[in-house]
Image (cartoon, helix red, strand yellow):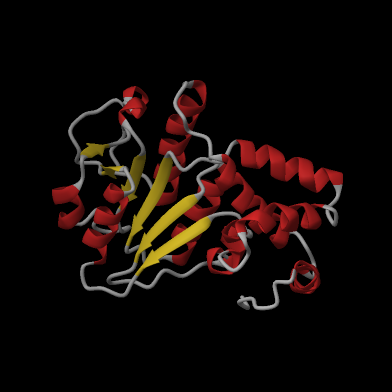
Amino acid sequence: MSRMMSRIPPQALSQVVNHFRSFLTDQRIELIDRNLSNRTRYLTVVLEDLFQPQNGSAVLRTCDCFGIQDVHVIETRNRFKVNAEVVRGATRWIDLHRYRHESDNTLKTIQHLKTQGYRVVATSPHAPDADLEQFDLSAGKVALVFGTEREGISPVVQAHADELIKIPMVGFTESFNISVSVAIILHVLTTALRKSDLPWQLSDQEKLSLLYAWYRNSLKTPELIERRFFSQLGIEERIEI
């Protein structure tokens, strides 16, 4: 979607968004506005080499439900597959970033996130004791890394993570299912984040870009509507999705 928006002059983007808006019901607009106000990039989720489609799909659905906009997927050993019945359309509302073309995808993902100002925080049942509810969100943006279902996070993540955290447990089983772990951690951290004074919400430009994408995804014939409106604006060339 970002490739397509790059063909729209910045001054015209708000016009396109307003045009899309005119085709939507008040209820749909209200739902989108509410969700947009709760969206964040202060927290992001990284999935390293998951191999079970139902787990990865459940995580995507969970991220959407907790207002996480970006999910980064590392595919060095395992190709990430989405189970449509599990994900329930969540991929229409979040941004999925995939890393699968290099032998060192994990390291490149970590380096990329750090250049974006994220602290890389790896989740592991073997991490030193750390109270999840006391996690310091004020130290900066957080990229939460979750490892593969069998082995957990890789040695590369362990070596390059800024911090390690774990979910307190009092049972005999070593760990939760990954989708459950993601849900627990996001519930704790997003609740604390929204109660804080930290700048966790999206910028106005980010909100406008998401309105474009979300409104477009809410229309039955977005290509036709868009093509006609682009023609009116004098934007003849466009990239097909």
Give the residue displayed 17% in from the left and 33% down from the top: 128
Which quadrant holds residue 175?
top left
Side of 205 relative to 230 (left or right)? left
- Residue 170 percent coordinates (x, y): 30, 30
Q: Is there any visible trace of residue 39 in the rendered image?
A: yes
| Closest to the observer, 215 or 195 | 215
In this picture, is 211 found above or below 129? below
The mark tally for this picture is 0
Q: Quadrant of the N terminus?
A: bottom right
**Where does residue 210 sit, x and y in percent of width and height?**
61, 51
Q: Position of residue 45 (x, y in %)?
A: 40, 49
Q: Quadrant of residue 121?
A: top left
Position of 56 compared to 37: left or right?
A: left
138 and 3: which is toward the camera: 3
Q: Residue 185 at x, y = what percent?
A: 40, 37
Residue under the image location 36 percent in, 37 percent down: 141
Question: Could you say which is closer to the camera, residue 23 or residue 170?
Answer: 23
Q: Is residue 225 above or below residue 66?
A: below
Q: For this view, does 200 lie left or right of residue 103? A: right
| Residue displayed at 45% across by 58% down | 55
Q: Position of 126 compared to 187: left or right?
A: left
| In the depicted structure, whether residue 89 falls above or below residue 174 | below
Residue 152 visible in rendering: no
- Residue drawn at x 85%, y 44% is 26
> Which quadrant: the C terminus?
bottom right
